[in-house]
Amino acid sequence: MNDLLDTFPRASLDRLAVADGNRSLTYAQLDAAANALARRLRALGVKPGVLVAICHDRSVAAVVGALAVLRAGGGYVGLDPAHPDARLAYLCSDAGVAVLLADASVVARLGSLPCPALDLDADLDAGDLDAGDLDAGEPPEPMAGPADVAYVIYTSGSTGEPKGVQVSRANLRALIDWHCQAFSVTPDDRASVVASPAFDASVWETWPHLAAGASLHIPDHATTVTPGALQKWMADEEITIGFVPTPMAELLLELEWPAYTALRIMLTGGDVLHRRPAPGTPFTLVNNYGVTEATVVSTSGVVAPEGAGLPSIGRSIAGTTLRVLGADGRVVPDGEPGELFISGRSVATGYLNRPELTAERFVPDPFSDEPGTRMYRTGDLARVADDNTVQFLGRIDDGQVQIRGHRIELDEIAAVLAGHPSVGHCAVVVREEGGDARLVAYVVPADVPMPGREDLRAYLAERLPAQMVPGAFVAIDALPVTTNGKLDRAALPAPGWQVLVGGSAAPEGPTEEAIAAILEELIELEGIGRDDNFFELGGHSLMGAQVVARIQERFGVELPLLAVFDNPSVADMAVVVSEAVLARVESMSDEEAEQLLASSGGE
Ligand code: ADP
């Protein structure tokens, strides 16, 4: 077999391969850049079984880096530069990476790693890609086989440490084959890349489209978290196929889509989908279910505008077999709930350096005649309908949760929090408030008084990705336990929200009051003060887009989403809004200005 993405067809060489806001490469240039880097990596000892970390924002440079690792025969470990240094350093050492490919700032941040670190951008800038000397760009001698590692993605781990899922080249090939066939991808397709490089959806967005000779298009971060901006970017870039995480897909479905949109397929997945496309939506919405341990996607199905109940997660994809088993290990009759097990070409190699955990989750497949075949036990509850579509019913245990598409082991957060010297015992749970899930930490202090929530938050923020830092910290005398001694999550008191707010003075003036009211309504929290911080109270980046929309409704000015990120307190947001209102007034006639000032509180 020609190994993965070793060469691109001659016919595609002049076509656009990948573009971000700064750079774009044709397939010939991508080939040359990746081959040059692959040869350097080979010289640094990268070969089958050797891992290379890539810690770089989504970009042309990151795609060149990952392709170079694959061509050198190694496997890449996708890391998100937004994660704290301590976590990135831990992941590099857990994976035992031989090389770090990163941007200059990450190279500086993680400078003390025991492996060479290469600045991907400097490398690209140094290469003369337009010179056309492509003969100089042969890839290194192929060495890797189908069983060798293609990539490692870390997922949350309940013991307090994330676990690396090792995915083989044969697994990746299965994903590529299914995707290209199922969605009839052609070189004319233009695909978006919006997922974090630490999330396996990025694998899905990238490789099948490059294998098909389509082009990849990469927006900046602010665009990926702002529905209106993402929609506009997709229209401007004439994106034809793209993945968006479930919460963003739900927001995009609320927008009007012009009939002439180039988008033909919107892929979504990662969390429970609550919406269907409106009749007449000019693209097909496809819901996908998958786990990192079975190479991104296991079921897939078109979501029709009409239909009763929540959309299904579709049917098993080519090469994958799903079984819903009862506690006795037998297949339950259709229509009955049970645990979902996945077998087939996409079942991953296992957890990196964790043989026991691998044996626990990747179990022998008793339904297969072939010895050694394994199936992955998902821990998800599901039911298969008569037409073979699968309904997702939730998690079997409540220790692993999805929050806005992020997979989180609550015990990982608790294990890290327990490392704080003032924390005796602790538990972290998810609370649903008004349809929105929020992490709440319960802390039994090691000594009195309870450490301040800022202190706890800062401690976690240095060690965990932002989405794993709880919005609320509640002091408690002892953690309630069930009769068999396990944490009794249901018996934990609902946090009185005064635990969170109340320390801050009341909003001053009509603008602050109106902004506090907007945040109170969105976060469903009363008594927000002028110094309270939107994100610390449980607001999140997608909610930020709603803040922008409400401010526009109320004040008639559209703030960039970044203005909310940069000014998350009520008082600071009020200053930005007042400035924007004034700027608008200055550009208006007297009559228009009076009207706007009257409607925005008269300031
Ligand atoms: P991915 O392969 O999408 O990165 P993760 O390994 O991060 O997935 O998380 C897997 C979990 O996400 C699943 O076990 C399931 O609980 C949840 N999940 C994934 N896709 C869906 C979906 N379409 N609907 C409901 N839950 C989903």
Image (cartoon, rainbow, N blue to C red):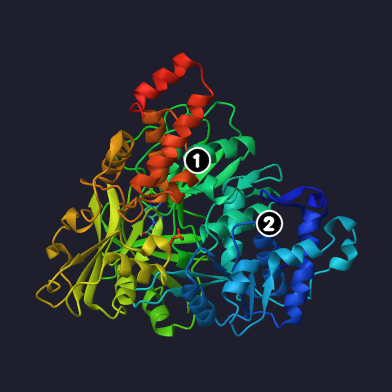
Determine whether the beta carbon of the residue marked 2 sits less than 8 angstroms from the nearest atom of ligand 1. no
Is residue 589 among what the camera can see?
A: yes
In the image, residue 360 sits, relative to residue 573, either above or below, namely: below
Left or right: 302 as drawn, with respect to 526: right
Residue at image position (39%, 29%) is 555
Q: Position of residue 476 (x, y in %)?
A: 15, 69
* Pointer 2 residue: 60
Q: Residue 560 — which label? A: 1
Q: Amino acid at mark 1?
A: Pro
Disc nearer the start of the sequence (2/1): 2
Residue at image position (45%, 20%) is 593
Closer to us: 582 or 311: 582
Residue at image position (27%, 51%) is 335
Q: Amino acid at mark 2?
A: Val
In the image, residue 143 sits, relative to residue 247, either above or below, namely: below
Closer to us: 452 or 106: 452
Q: Position of residue 138 (x, y in %)?
A: 83, 68
